[in-house]
Image (spheres, rainbow, N blue to C red):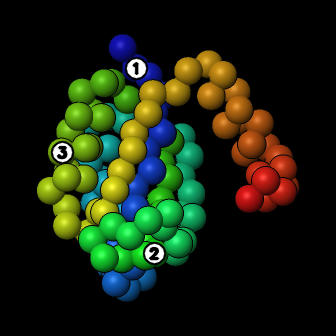
């Protein structure tokens, strides 16, 4: 059964712009190989972490929203764990309320910036 998921990962801040793009394209390629459909993505950029992770106080945040089977999430998270550039990641299954919220947020980006 195909569900919609949202994954956010934080990459180490010592990466160059090209290294970051290469890492993101690696995750895109994996999703495409597994038959996932990318619905939305957003590069949040370099942000301060709430607490230090591996002695780093900042990290590159990246969000990908996609439709896929459940086993794709397992495979994606294995790749995250093996990639030393990824500090943290979180993948969640979106319910109907989350889907509606995300659609509304995409249609009105000014509302999102007001809360940030």
Q: Nearer the viewer, mark 2 or mark 3?
A: 2
> How far apart are the two marked residues, 1 and 3, measured between alpha carbons?
20 Å
Residue at 44% over, 65% down: 51
Left or right of 39 on screen, residue 105: right
SS under mark 1: loop
Q: Residues within 10 Å of mark 3 (few under 14, many from 20)?
A: few
Q: Residue at x 30, y 24 (%)?
A: 70
Mark 2 Cα-neighbour bin, 10 Å: few <14, some 14–19, many ≥20 = some
| N-term mark: 1 or 3 | 1
Query: CA separation, marks 2 and 1?
Result: 34 Å
- The reply, left or right, for residue 34 in relation to residue 115 is left
* 36 w.r.t. 46: above or below: above
Residue 66 at what x, y percent from top left?
A: 46, 38
Task: Name the residue carrying label 2.
Answer: 58
Q: Quickly name the residue at label 1.
A: 2
Q: Toward which corner of the image does residue 116 lie, by quadrant?
A: bottom right
Q: Which mark is residue 78?
A: 3
Q: Position of residue 99 (x, y in %)?
A: 63, 28
- Residue at the spot x=72%, y=45% of the render? 106
Residue at the limit of the structure toward the left, as seen here = 82
Dot 1 crowding, Cα within 10 Å, few <14, some 14–19, many 20+: few
Image quadrant containing the N terminus: top left
Residue 93 image-quadrant placement: top left
* Dots 2, 1 in contact, CB < 8 A: no
Q: Is residue 4 above or below residue 61?
A: above
């Amino acid at each position: 059964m195909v569900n919609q998921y949202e994954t956010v990962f934080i990459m180490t801040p010592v990466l160059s712009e090209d290294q970051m793009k290469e890492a993101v394209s690696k995750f895109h390629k994996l999703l495409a190989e597994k038959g996932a459909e990318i619905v939305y993505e957003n590069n949040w950029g370099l942000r301060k972490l709430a607490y230090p992770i591996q002695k780093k106080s900042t990290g590159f945040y990246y969000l990908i929203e996609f439709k896929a089977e459940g086993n794709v999430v397992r495979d994606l998270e294995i790749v995250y764990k093996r990639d030393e550039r990824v500090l943290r990641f979180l993948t969640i299954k979106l319910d109907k309320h989350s889907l509606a919220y995300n659609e509304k947020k995409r249609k009105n980006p000014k509302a999102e910036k007001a809360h940030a």
